[in-house]
Image: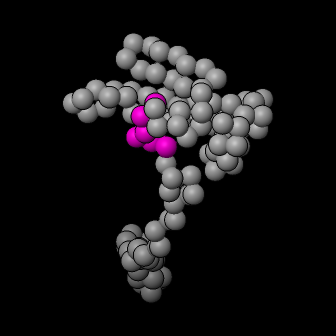
């Protein structure tokens, strides 16, 4: 009986032991998407217009600005807010979608916007 008690005690103690910690493996840095490499963030409204032509829609709200560019394939909304001490408008968010409202990536949308400008 003593052997069973010792065996049970050993199993109980083993169950309380911590797991050995795994050394984190070094993963390669993720490659940026093509749209990220040529990011539209930080551009002024004038720079955006020079790239994509006259916007189909322009909305001012307070000190912010939204420009919408359209092609037959997609719609891009660019949001501009005051930046830095100069307060000049810079793009802080870009949203792209299909005309139906469905999802499309920037990489797929931007070429069609350039072609229609």
Q: Looking at the picture, how far across and down is residue 11, in whole percent?
A: 45, 77
Give the residue at the far bottom of this rendering.
Answer: 3
Please name the predominant secondary structure of the magenta segment in the image: loop
Q: Looking at the picture, how far across and down is residue 9, in whole percent?
A: 40, 76
Q: Is residue 98 placed above or below 68 in the rendered structure?
A: below
Q: Which residue appears at 32% of the width and 28% of the height?
A: 88
Q: Nearer the viewer, residue 103 or 4?
A: 103
Q: Which residues are magenta?
A: 40-45
Residue 43 part of the magenta segment: yes
Residue 104 seen in this snapshot: no
24 left or right of 58 in image: left
Q: Nearer the viewer, residue 80 or 16?
A: 80
Q: Is residue 37 placed above or below 65 in the rendered structure?
A: below
Q: Looking at the picture, how far across and down is residue 113, in whole percent?
A: 67, 39
Q: Is residue 20 placed above or below 91 in the rendered structure?
A: below
Q: Which residue appears at 51% of the width and 60% of the height?
A: 32
């Amino acid at each position: 009986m003593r052997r069973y008690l010792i065996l049970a005690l050993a199993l109980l103690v083993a169950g309380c032991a911590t797991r050995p910690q795994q050394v984190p493996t070094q993963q390669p840095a993720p490659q940026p998407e093509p749209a990220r490499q040529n990011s539209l963030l930080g551009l002024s409204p004038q720079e955006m217009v020079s790239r994509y032509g006259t916007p189909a829609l322009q909305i001012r709200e307070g000190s912010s600005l939204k420009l919408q560019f359209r092609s037959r394939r997609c719609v891009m909304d660019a949001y501009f807010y005051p930046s830095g001490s100069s307060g000049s408008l810079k793009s802080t968010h870009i949203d792209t979608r299909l005309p139906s409202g469905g999802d499309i990536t920037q990489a797929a949308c931007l070429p069609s916007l350039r072609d229609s400008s």
